[in-house]
Amino acid sequence: MLSDEIKRLHELHQAGALSDAEYEQAKARILSGAATVSLSKDATSREGTSFDAHRDNLLSGLRRSRLDRWLGGVCGGLARTYGLESWVWRLIFVLFVLSFGTGILIYLLLWVFVPEE
């Protein structure tokens, strides 16, 4: 809901996570219907804020696929979001399982925390 997003922005601004310029820019984008919020140069120089906003932008459109799935739809959702084919994402997860053993953990975490489309 639009009012919830503006309220959340106001809370971030009050907590000091957003500067005045960032707050006004984000508020204008929400009101104009823009989907992503870009950071200004001064925000990227502050520690923590740029990482959090970058992470939020990377994961904001991620959804598990209902159609392109073998198990949980994670690879199909990654393919739709980032433009790589789903078989490439499956290969990446298999390589991580075989080489580092972390592929299963990452896949399970994405399966649990990423909502379905």
Image: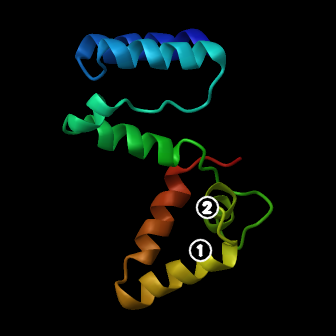
Q: Quadrant of residue 34?
A: top right
Residue nearer the viewer, 9 or 114: 9
Task: Name which residue type carries label 1.
Answer: Trp
Q: Residues within 10 Å of mark 2 (few under 14, many from 20)?
A: many
Residue nearer the viewer, 32 or 77: 32
Where is residue 61 shown, x and y percent of the image?
A: 60, 44
SS under mark 2: helix
Mark earlier in primary sequence (2, 1)? 2
Q: For this view, does 55 lie left or right of residue 44? A: right
87 in relation to 29, above or below: below
| Disc number for residue 89 | 1
Residue on which disc 2 sits: 78
Alpha carbon of mark 2 to alpha carbon of mark 1: how far? 7 Å
Instruction: Please tell me which residue is depicted at 49% across the width and 48% down the height of the picture.
Output: 58
Q: Are marks 2 and 1 in contact (CB under 8 Å)?
A: yes
Where is residue 47 shown, x and y percent of the image?
A: 19, 38
15 in relation to 104, above or below: above
Residue nearer the viewer, 102 or 17: 17
106 in relation to 92, above or below: above
Instruction: Please tell me which residue is depicted at 45% across the width and 10% down the height of the picture.
Output: 7
